[in-house]
Image (cartoon, rainbow, N blue to C red):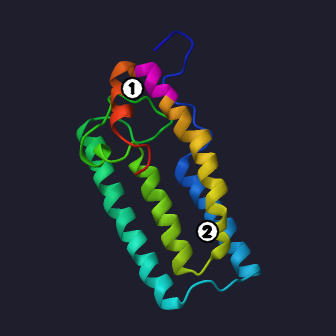
Amino acid sequence: MEEGISDNPGVIAFPPALYAGTLLIGLVLSFMFPIDFLSRSVALALGVLAIICAGLIVTSAFRTMNRAQTEVNPSRPTTAIVSDGVFRLSRNPIYLSLTLFYIGIALLLGALWALLLLFPLLVIVQIGIVQREENYLERKFGDEYLRYKARVRRWV
């Protein structure tokens, strides 16, 4: 790292808190202004499926990062490019799992407002978190990260 540049990506917020806060706002709006949009059985099935997928992805991502002995917390320095396990399929499996979990909870609770707020949330995540992390990793790891980035899609 260059002098004067912090050894972390400088994300705008702790990602789980950003997802949780947005979901909470969506749930409150859905309670105040309910809108029916899916049958209960379809919402239940899709919600459970999304949550199970989220759990599998995040568990795999955490195990892979722990094996590589690098940080999961984006406010701390990254020590390695993790490119195996679920990271062979997505550069951001943890954010993918947070998104799937968010969708699952919104579906289970019939919260259309929460689903509508997902779109601006993903724009904020992309600009305020993912792009900052990618810029940081390019500065820190150079060609190694650029090769990984060329091989693996950002989300799925």
Say what secondary structure mark 1 lies in: helix
On residue 45, which mark appears? none
In the picture as drawn, the residue positioned furthest to the front comes out as 150
Whether 122 is drawn above or below 113: the answer is: above
Q: Which residue: 25% across, 36% down?
A: 68
Q: Quadrant of residue 153?
A: top left
Q: Is residue 43 visible?
A: yes
Q: Front-most of 149 and 12?
A: 149
Q: Quadrant of residue 70?
A: top left
Q: Earlier in the sequence, mark 1 or mark 2?
A: 2
Q: Which residue is mark 2?
A: 115
Type of the residue with mark 1? Leu
Give x and y (percent) for residue 136.
49, 26
Magenta residues, start to end: 135-140
Q: Nearer the viewer, mark 1 or mark 2?
A: 1
On residue 146, which mark appears? 1
Quadrant into which the N terminus falls? top left
Whether 19 is drawn above or below 125: the answer is: below
Type of the residue with mark 2? Leu
Give x and y (percent) for residue 43.
50, 82
Whether 14 is drawn above or below 44: the answer is: above
Tell me the CA gap for discs 1 and 2.
33 Å
Q: Which residue: 71% across, 80% down?
A: 31
